[in-house]
Image (cartoon, rainbow, N blue to C red):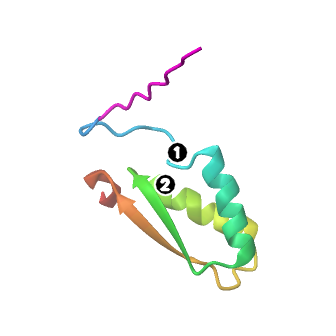
Amino acid sequence: HTSSTTQLTVNTPDSILQISCLTPKDRVDLEYMLGIGVDWIALSFVQRPEDIVEIKRLIMEYNPQNMCPPHVMAKIEKPSVSD
């Protein structure tokens, strides 16, 4: 029996997607990384300012005393992030 899997991607250069850039796996990985005390968190596919706000909120929820929170590095995908 042979099976093939096709992954489709959609390029939307002029559109801002109103979805989180964090997948459920990203959230699990983030919690693990915060637990081991990383210095930096890298975030890809950032399209809107809310994406940065969301990850900073998650960091604060994990570390409410804000004891040495990691820095956030973002790969900006859309110019609208800086608006």
Q: Front-most of 22 and 65?
A: 22
Residue located at (66% from left, 59% from top): 29
The kind of residue tagged 2 is Asp
Residue located at (43% from left, 57% from top): 44
Are the residues tagged 1 and 2 within 8 Å (C-beta)? yes
Q: Secondary structure at mark 1?
A: loop
Residue located at (72% from left, 76% from top): 36
Write down the quadrant of residue 18 in the picture.
Answer: top left
Residue located at (70% from left, 54% from top): 28
Residue 8 location (% of width, % of height): 40, 27
The kind of residue tagged 1 is Ser
Q: Which mark is residue 20?
A: 1
Q: Front-most of 8 and 30?
A: 8
Tell me where the magenta segment starts and ends, as one range: 1-11
Residue 11 location (% of width, % of height): 30, 35
How far, Cα to Cα, is label 1 from label 2?
6 Å
Q: Which residue is mark 2?
A: 51
Give the crowd class for mark 2: few <14, some 14-19, many >=20 residues within 10 Å.
many
